[in-house]
């Protein structure tokens, strides 16, 4: 990149807890969060990873979808972490970019049930402002008083990572000085659970919720539906230096490709992921041997983990990096995953620790000797780490983070 992009703040709302420290504690201890969710009892699979109860927040929060409430909470933490408030910026030079796979789907399903039960008069007038996919970014920009670009990115489960790439492009083009970027989704709903189940994407280990999400493990049988939000504050390095703020890490490179292979299945040899990796490392001025750690997409589905493992094994033959999938602990947070995992990759660099992959106990023929961290976190030198995100539609994104 011509302009070094700094990560100066992060905020998290996940099934692991409210805030970065709570989430890191859950992930670094390899603690699963999956439960049998009563709200999904009428769905074919009732497993889920839920965010703990949020504080009430401003009185108007009832108007917002659950995913937007997550966003407000994570954004507050990220801005505090970056030592920013409205007095510190020109509002026209601040952008808000939010990734989401399904927008306010929880609101839409709730209001649809009300209409079916009690007729159109039961539908809330706030349905569309809560549901429309762009409104999470719009509501946050309104809350912050920012007047720069604000919009939503949607590349399915890569949406949060795509928001971060978009932020880099805006900063590199000089459109803004600060970007509040991330991803949020609240897709733990009966319709979403039923639809994913019909596709065969969800784990059916209802007898063992805690062991259901097991990325790269021989006995994996699908992901666990989850919810959450990750927000990162990005700015050019010289802008952060002028504010006297030390970056948490640098977003040194990124790559984005499409498989053009199948609507939902990854390319079997991971061709798009390979190309995205090459692009990210080239932008970062690095090679395969420079990668110390990978925060993998690692969904716990047979096809994804096999394709991703194939790419990692092929590209890093001389110096294999450690590999982590936090979905073993947090489940699959859908459009939020790329941002949550980017934030955790930044924390891995700042803590010099690769978290374990929960429930990884027995590898299969493609995941053996992959370098998957299991059991406990591993202290190591991490100068360059990658975060992978893949999505339905053949989307592949790779983010390359380096120590500041």
Image (cartoon, rainbow, N blue to C red):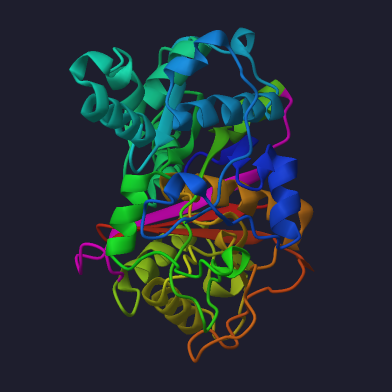
Q: Which residue does the image show at 44% across and 12% down from the upper left? A: 142
Read off the magenta span. 244-266
Residue 205 drawn above or below residue 382: below
State the image quarter where residue 378 is shown: bottom right
Whether residue 400 is visible to the viewer of this picture, yes or no, is yes
> Which residue occupies the foreground of this view, 193 or 57?
193
Q: Farthest residue toward the front?
A: 117
**Residue at left offset 69%, top offset 67%:** 356
Q: Give the residue at the far bottom of this rendering.
A: 365
Instruction: Name the one closer to the observer, 184 or 188.
Output: 188
State how many labels appear: 0
Is residue 133 in view from this perspective? no
Q: Residue at x 48, y 9 (%)?
A: 145
Q: Position of residue 335 (x, y in %)?
A: 41, 46
Examine the structure image and report whether residue 152 is included in the region drawn in magenta.
no
In this rendering, position of residue 347 left or right of residue 49: right
């Amino acid at each position: 990149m011509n302009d070094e992009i700094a990560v100066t703040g992060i905020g998290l709302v996940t099934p692991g807890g409210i805030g970065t420290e709570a989430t890191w504690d859950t992930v670094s201890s390899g603690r699963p969060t999956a439960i049998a969710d009563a709200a999904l009892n009428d769905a074919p699979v009732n497993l889920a990873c839920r965010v703990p109860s949020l504080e009430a927040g401003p009185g108007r929060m009832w108007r917002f979808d659950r995913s937007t409430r997550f966003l407000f909470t994570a954004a507050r933490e990220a801005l505090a972490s970056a030592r920013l408030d409205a007095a510190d910026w020109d509002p026209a030079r601040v952008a808000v970019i939010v990734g989401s796979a399904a927008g306010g789907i929880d609101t839409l399903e709730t209001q649809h049930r009300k209409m079916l039960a009690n007729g159109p008069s039961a539908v809330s007038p706030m349905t569309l402002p809560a549901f429309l996919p762009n409104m999470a970014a719009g509501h946050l920009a309104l809350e912050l008083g920012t007047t720069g670009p604000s919009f939503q990115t949607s590349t399915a489960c890569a949406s949060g990572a795509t928001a971060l790439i978009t932020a880099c492009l805006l900063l590199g083009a000089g459109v803004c000085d600060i970007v509040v970027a991330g991803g949020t989704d609240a897709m733990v709903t009966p319709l979403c659970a039923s639809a994913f189940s019909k596709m065969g994407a969800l784990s059916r280990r209802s007898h063992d919720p805690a062991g259901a999400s097991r990325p790269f493990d021989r006995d994996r049988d699908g992901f666990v539906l989850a919810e959450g939000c990750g927000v990162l504050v990005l700015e050019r390095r010289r802008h952060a230096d002028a504010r006297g703020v030390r970056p948490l890490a640098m977003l040194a490179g990124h790559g984005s490709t499409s498989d053009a292979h199948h609507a939902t299945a990854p390319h079997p040899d991971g061709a798009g992921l390979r190309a995205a990796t090459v692009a990210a490392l080239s932008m970062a001025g690095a090679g395969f041997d420079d990668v110390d750690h990978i925060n993998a997409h690692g969904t716990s589905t047979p096809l994804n983990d096999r394709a991703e493992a194939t790419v990692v094994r092929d590209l890093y033959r001389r110096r294999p990096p450690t590999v982590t999938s936090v979905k073993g602990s947090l489940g699959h947070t859908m459009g939020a995953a790329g941002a949550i995992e980017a934030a955790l990759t930044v924390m891995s660099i700042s803590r010099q620790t690769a978290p374990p992959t929960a429930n990884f106990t027995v590898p299969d023929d493609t995941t053996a000797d992959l370098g998957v961290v299991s059991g406990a976190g591993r202290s190591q030198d991490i100068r360059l780490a990658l975060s992978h995100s893949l999505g339905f539609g053949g989307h592949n994104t790779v983010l390359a983070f380096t120590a500041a």
